[in-house]
Image (cartoon, helix red, strand yellow):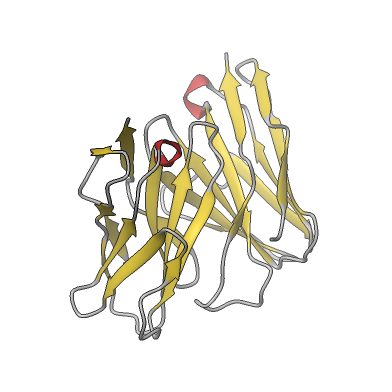
């Protein structure tokens, strides 16, 4: 099946720094990628929809100036957590869809990035 | 807005028994998809099974089957002959233009 990678897999940073997480579709092109956040023992919460060549669509309650999303190419989306604080510590997962859209398809997930802010 | 509900936070099942994980959803859309994912402790999301809203037959994938009852808006996952390796979190998810996840069920398979 299609492969989605994330880098880094784990990052520890100091409070106040910015952290960039990359999501790549390795063997397919994705016009749309999704970013999720998962706190311990909780479900995945959709943060935003990343659209190639246009602005991301953020879910209600997600600060777009805090979580910057750039989908610069058909195989790469980046999530930058700006001025990270301990409450931003979480597991961030991206997903991508290799097809043009619609309900009849699968979504491929990256392996996730565990962010710890000290 | 779409809503997806998993009412079983945790389940304990004896190895080799079948297990049903519940999932209900709420939508006014006609075209949508329903997914089940498994998430082991490593954190990766493993796709198990998919059901389209227009599919007349219940989806099956090996030991996994999806009991789709459209009128009741339910999409329960059935795992037959459970194995110790099935112990994990299981998420039901609803998709129209984006995927929304339920809260999940932690399944424990007992030897």
User: Which quadrant of the view contains residue B24?
Assistant: bottom left
Position of residue A107 relative to residue A87, above or below, is below
Q: Is residue A65 visible?
A: no
Position of residue A44 relative to residue B40, above or below, is below
Q: Is residue A78 left or right of residue A102?
A: right
Q: Total number of numbered labels?
A: 0
User: Which quadrant of the view contains residue A105?
Assistant: bottom right
Residue at 45% of width from left, 73% of height from top? B96
Q: Is residue A64 left or right of residue A21?
A: left
Q: Is residue B100 left or right of residue A83?
A: left
Residue at 70% of width from left, 65% of height from top? A54
Q: Is residue B38 visible?
A: yes
Residue at 35% of width from left, 46% of height from top? B82
Residue at 20% of width from left, 49% of height from top? B7
**Picture quarter with the C terminus of chain A:** top right
**Picture quarter with the N terminus of chain A:** bottom right
Residue A37 lies, in percent from the top left, at: 50, 41
Position of residue B49 relative to residue A5, above or below, is below
- In depth, the one of A46 and B91 nearer the eye is B91
Residue B76 lies, in percent from the top left, at: 28, 62
Residue B73 lies, in percent from the top left, at: 23, 72
User: Which quadrant of the view contains residue A28?
Assistant: bottom right
Residue B21 lies, in percent from the top left, at: 27, 53
């Amino acid at each position: 099946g299609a492969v989605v990678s994330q880098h880094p897999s784990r990052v520890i940073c100091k409070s106040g720094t910015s952290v960039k997480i990359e999501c790549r579709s390795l063997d397919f092109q994705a016009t749309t990628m999704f970013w999720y956040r998962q706190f311990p023992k909780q479900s995945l919460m959709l943060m935003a929809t990343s659209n190639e060549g246009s602005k991301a669509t953020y879910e209600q309650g997600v600060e777009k100036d805090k979580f910057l999303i750039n989908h610069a190419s058909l195989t790469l989306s980046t999530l930058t957590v700006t001025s990270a604080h301990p409450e931003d510590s979480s597991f961030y997962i991206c997903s991508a869809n290799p097809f043009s859209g619609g309900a009849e398809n699968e979504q491929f997930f990256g392996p996730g990035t565990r962010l710890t802010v000290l | 807005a779409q809503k997806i509900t998993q009412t079983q936070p945790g389940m304990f099942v004896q190895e080799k028994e079948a297990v049903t994980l519940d999932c209900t959803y709420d939508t006014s859309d006609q075209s949508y998809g329903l997914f089940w994912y498994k998430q082991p402790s490593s954190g990766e999301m493993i796709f198990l099974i998919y059901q389209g809203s227009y599919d007349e037959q219940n989806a099956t994938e090996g030991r996994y089957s999806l009991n789709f009852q459209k009128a009741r808006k339910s999409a329960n996952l059935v795992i037959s002959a459970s194995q110790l390796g099935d112990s994990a979190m299981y998420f039901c998810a609803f998709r129209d233009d984006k995927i929304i996840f339920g809260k999940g069920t932690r399944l424990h398979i007992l030897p």
